[in-house]
Image (cartoon, grey):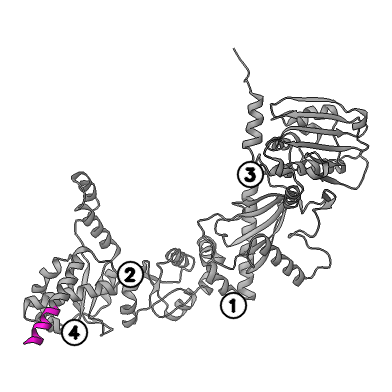
Amino acid sequence: MSQTFRVDLRGMVDLLSHHLYTSPQVYVRELLQNAVDAITAVHQDAGAARRAPRIAISSGEATGDGSLTISDNGIGLSEAQVHELLATIGRSSKRDDLGFARHEFMGQFGIGLLSCFMVSDAIEVATRREGEPTVLWHGRSDGSYTLAPAPADRQRPETGTTVTLRPRPGCEHLLTRRAVTGLAAHYGARLPHPVTVDGEPVTGGPAPWDRPEGEGAAERRARLEAYCEEVFGFAPFDVVDLAAAEAGLRGVAFVLPMPANPAVPAAHRVHLKQMLLSEGAERLLPEWAFFVRCVVDTTELRPTASREALYEDSLLEATREALGERLRGWLVRLSVQEPARLRSFLRVHHLGVKALALHDDEMLELVAEFWPMETNVGPLTLAEFTARYGLLRYTPLLDEFRQLAPVAAAQGLAVVNAGYVYDAELIDRFATVDRSLETEQLRAADLTTHLARLDAADERALAPFLAAADPVLARLGCDLLVRSFEPSGLPALYLLDDDTAFQLDVRGAREQVDETWAAILDSFRSESEPRPRLVLNHRNPLARQVLGLAEPELRAMCLEGLYVQALLLGHHPLRPADTAALNQSFLGLIGRAVAGGAA
């Protein structure tokens, strides 16, 4: 048998009024929205008399009894419309019939009034439609209401609506003149209709997105910069006009003069039909555009039920793309008209632009042309590097670049450090877009192929030393090579590629876990057991002297010393075994020196 749901009306009112909104302060915004909608309806009704719009708020001080009233001279409601608009939650068909669901209107009368139950246990609405008598509606937080014709002394002389709230205990401060003036100015300062609190206006002045007639470019820029400092707390690097016709959106973007954290969503000020909707709206712009803060007004984007954020739909997605195009166009114009200023911008916000360049060819060209990357021959843009050296040789890891940079430079190899965020991906994309570009990834293991081998006679002479040195470095998990390379002042070079480092980590972790985890880690181990390499420089006098040592103990201490020095020069962390080797070689050599001096 079919049955209907049972609804606890008191609980429903409590849920919507206390949990739909983030703060009780939004009651002022909701009342203003209803008043603006009522005035808008007058202009939409061909039969309604035209009059200057007016919204007047009286605070607790002005009424004398602590209550608050807000009056408008909008279209007003008849008795039947009060039932449909103020006392029905969840129905939209009648709103359509009555004309209050069209896009010209900000909200819905009934839902908006629910916010008032956060500051008052009872709401009184006195309203009059053209040609109808004034009716009084009393709504209570328990979900009940009464509706009756107004007595003679409560009849309104003109059409419109007056809402009266009496504060619940603990909320009196929210209905004071100071509080109401601040909230009305905060939410409604840009409304197109005059709003007063206790007779004092709170609206007026051009909105950020406006272009007042006669205002010059310099005056407008100064006004917007002052607005940005007041609202966002910074002097903008630049100001970019925004527009998205499909969303009825207009506004401005303020470019941050300091780095922003891309992991923290940017918060923007969004107005809906010139009423402040949210000052913390997220996802208005693409994720890469975290370097701007926006203030916009929209007529077509949909708000959420609480009207404190934007509803995620296809229109918002299209708007996000359109605004991203505006910012991208600004960057392109900057590169053409003010390249020095663009470089200043990139020094601060390169991460956002590089993120965009990963999927935008025009931005990729901009990054390649203007963003200097770190190389072992000094800072160069990708365009400068390829023009100078042809082959775009790079290393994708920062630690590897630190190892290889001085040695590669001494061998005449120019290398780009692609170890920073997005850089390796940008180089790959650069090569994909420009098919004529030749790239080469240089890893630590590959560098040995660029180092000169010794002639056959020298290799035969060093063979006994290498055989004797193998056990010393084997204890440290390292292989020994001898090569001849520049700079000659560098006695030894420690080469560890990414794959070998991973295998060393797996091996170290296996020694510290139980048999079950050891078996799991074995699946990651390589059969070849690769090891890092210590490369002694045959051109270095000290390295050659160590190679010629005959005493095994002294040779071992010197090898361990060169090994640890190479680790430190390459910015590698020291394991316990490495620290032990450092202590042993250092103290051993000091002991030898002291003993020799005493003799």
Residue highlighted by disc 2: 400
Residue highlighted by disc 4: 542
The mark nearer the N terminus, 4 or 3, is: 3
Mark 4 neighbour class, 10 Å CA radius: few under 14, some 14 to 19, many 20 or more? some
Q: Examine the residues drawn in magenta and state their main secondary structure.
A: helix
Q: Position of residue 86 (x, y in %)?
A: 76, 31
Q: Nearer the viewer, residue 70 or 445?
A: 70
Label 2, label 4: how far apart the Cα atoms are = 25 Å
User: Magenta span has 496?
Assistant: no
Label 1, label 3: how far apart the Cα atoms are = 40 Å
The amino acid at mark 1 is Ala
Q: Is residue 456 visible?
A: no
The quadrant in which the N terminus is found is top right
The mark nearer the N terminus, 2 or 4, is: 2
Classify 465 as above or below 54: below
The mark lying in front, picked from 1 and 4, is: 4
Q: Position of residue 510 (x, y in %)?
A: 21, 52
Residue visible at 19% across and 86% down in the picture: 541
Residue highlighted by disc 3: 311
Q: Using the rendered view, name the quadrant where residue 203 is placed.
A: bottom right
In the rendered structure, which segment of residues is drawn in magenta? 589-599
The mark lying in front, picked from 2 and 4, is: 4
The amino acid at mark 3 is Tyr
Residue visible at 77% across and 44% down in the picture: 32
Residue visible at 59% across and 68% down in the picture: 257
Whether the residues at callouts 4 and 3 have beta carbons within 8 Å, the answer is no
The amino acid at mark 2 is Glu
Could you say which disc has been placed on residue 340 in the image? Answer: 1
The mark nearer the N terminus, 1 or 3, is: 3
Could you say which disc has been placed on residue 524 in the image? Answer: none
